[in-house]
Image (tube, rainbow, N blue to C red):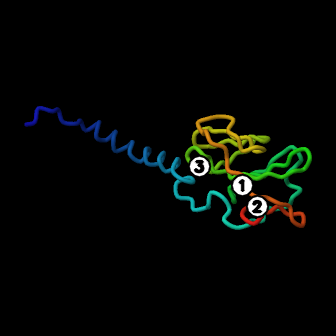
């Protein structure tokens, strides 16, 4: 006999019940949403859609490509990766021109890429973007 009390049946069952929940949490906060293979930024030029979808002074989130495009008052377009710089979660929410990360609540300005709420501390990487024939194209070579 070792002198240490043995674990109760209840403690063992509680630990077993929590293990899947902990694993789910790690998966949800892992790189790019836990196994999603979409690249953090486009690796080639991608057609995002009609240029008219991005209003002056506004922004549009392109979830399928992990890109946000904004247009300032004079019509200048800017694009940023929407992979959070804190834990590499794909950002899936845009309110006005504020991007909100679902994993830990980081917020970014979609017009500048700057962090407006931590825990993220680094801005979103800017991407090349251009309008071509009424369509938006983002990524390398854009």
Residue under circle 3? 89
> In front: 108, or 125?
125
Left or right of 42? Residue 58 is right
Residue bearing mark 2: 138
Q: The residue tagged with tag 1: helix, strand or loop?
A: strand
Q: Are marks 3 and 1 in contact (CB under 8 Å)?
A: no
Question: Which residue is label 1 attached to?
Answer: 67
Point out residue 42 in the picture as x, y percentages from the top left corner: 68, 62
Labelled pair 2, 3 in contact (Cβ < 8 Å)? no
User: Which residue is depicted at the point 84% across and 45% down?
Assistant: 58
Query: Could you tell me if the residues under marks 2 and 1 are in contact, i.e. CB atoms within 8 Å?
Result: yes
Q: Residue at x 58, y 36 (%)?
A: 119
Mark 3: give few (<14), some (14-19) or many (20+) Cα within 10 Å: many
Quarter of the image containing the C terminus?
bottom right
Local crowd size for mark 1, using a 10 Å CA cut-off: few (<14), some (14–19), many (≥20):
many
The span from disc 2 to disc 1 (Cα, nearest Å) is 8 Å
User: Which comes before the other along the chain, label 3 or label 1?
Assistant: 1
Left or right, residue 61 beside residue 40: right
What is the C-alpha distance between the residues marked 3 and 1? 13 Å
- The front one of 123 and 5 is 123
The percent position of residue 80, horizontal first and vertical second, equals 72, 51
Vertical side of 133 occupied by 69: above or below:
above
Q: Quadrant of residue 132?
A: bottom right
Residue at horizontal 51 percent and vertical 50 percent from the top: 30
For label 2, the crowd category at 10 Å Cα-Cα, with few meaning under 14, some 14 to 19 and many 20 or more, is: many
Among the two numbered marks 2 and 1 on one chain, the one whose residue lies closer to the N terminus: 1
């Amino acid at each position: 006999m070792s002198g240490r009390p043995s674990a109760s049946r209840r403690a063992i069952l509680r630990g077993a019940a929590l293990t899947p929940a902990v694993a789910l949490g790690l998966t949800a906060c892992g790189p790019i949403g836990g196994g999603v293979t979409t690249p953090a930024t486009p690796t080639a030029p991608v057609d995002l859609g009609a240029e008219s979808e991005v209003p002056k002074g506004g922004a549009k989130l392109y979830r399928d490509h992990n890109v946000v495009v904004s247009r300032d008052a004079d019509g200048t377009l800017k694009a940023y990766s929407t992979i959070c710089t804190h834990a590499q979660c794909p950002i899936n929410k845009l309110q006005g021109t504020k991007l909100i990360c679902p994993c830990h609540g980081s917020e970014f300005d979609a017009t500048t890429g700057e962090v407006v709420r931590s825990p993220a501390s680094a801005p979103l990487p800017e991407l090349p973007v251009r309008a071509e024939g009424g369509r938006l194209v983002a990524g390398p070579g854009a």
